[in-house]
Image: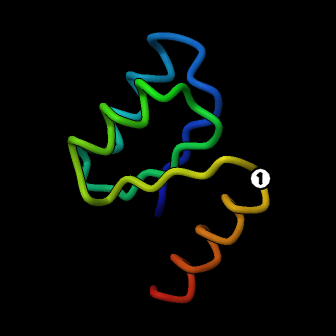
Amino acid sequence: MDSMVCGGGGSGTASEATHALNGGRPLILLAVPALWREFFCSLSKGVECASDVQECCRLIEARIKEA
């Protein structure tokens, strides 16, 4: 199962993203600040970024097809 972070409003959201990565799960970041993108993408190749909902849906659909 993939994990998705939307917005990036605080430490709770960052904590959930970290838990996903620690669990070896792929992570999709949706509309998060640039600093978050840089940081989380530097931690794992399993992190993808989406700038809008449509792009996020395409990334999720692609992951489902791969499974």
- Residue 46 is left or right of residue 31, and the answer is left
Residue 4 place in picture, x, y as percent: 55, 46
Residue, far right: 54
Q: Nearer the viewer, residue 50 or 25?
A: 50
Q: Residue at x 34, y 35 (%)?
A: 38
Residue 29 place in picture, x, y as percent: 53, 44
Residue, far top: 10
| Quadrant hosting residue 45 | bottom left
- Residue 66 is left or right of residue 19, and the answer is right
Give the quadrant of the C terminus. Answer: bottom left
Q: Is residue 62 above or below residue 3?
A: below
Q: For the residue carrying disc 1, how many other residues have a C-alpha within 10 Å: few (<14), some (14-19), or many (20+)?
A: few
Q: Nearer the viewer, residue 46 or 2?
A: 46
Q: Residue at x 64, y 28 (%)?
A: 7
Which residue does the numbered mark 1 point to in the structure image? 53
Residue 11 place in picture, x, y as percent: 44, 11
Helix, strand or loop under label 1: helix
Residue type at the position of mark 1: Val
- Residue 57 is left or right of residue 40, and the answer is right
Color style of the picture: rainbow
| Quadrant hosting residue 60 | bottom right
Q: Is residue 11 above or below residue 21?
A: above
Q: Residue at x 66, y 58 (%)?
A: 56
Q: Residue at x 40, y 34 (%)?
A: 17
| Quadrant hosting residue 39 | top left
Q: Nearer the viewer, residue 8 or 34?
A: 34
Q: Is residue 1 above or below residue 44?
A: below
Residue 47 place in picture, x, y as percent: 37, 53
Q: How many marks?
A: 1
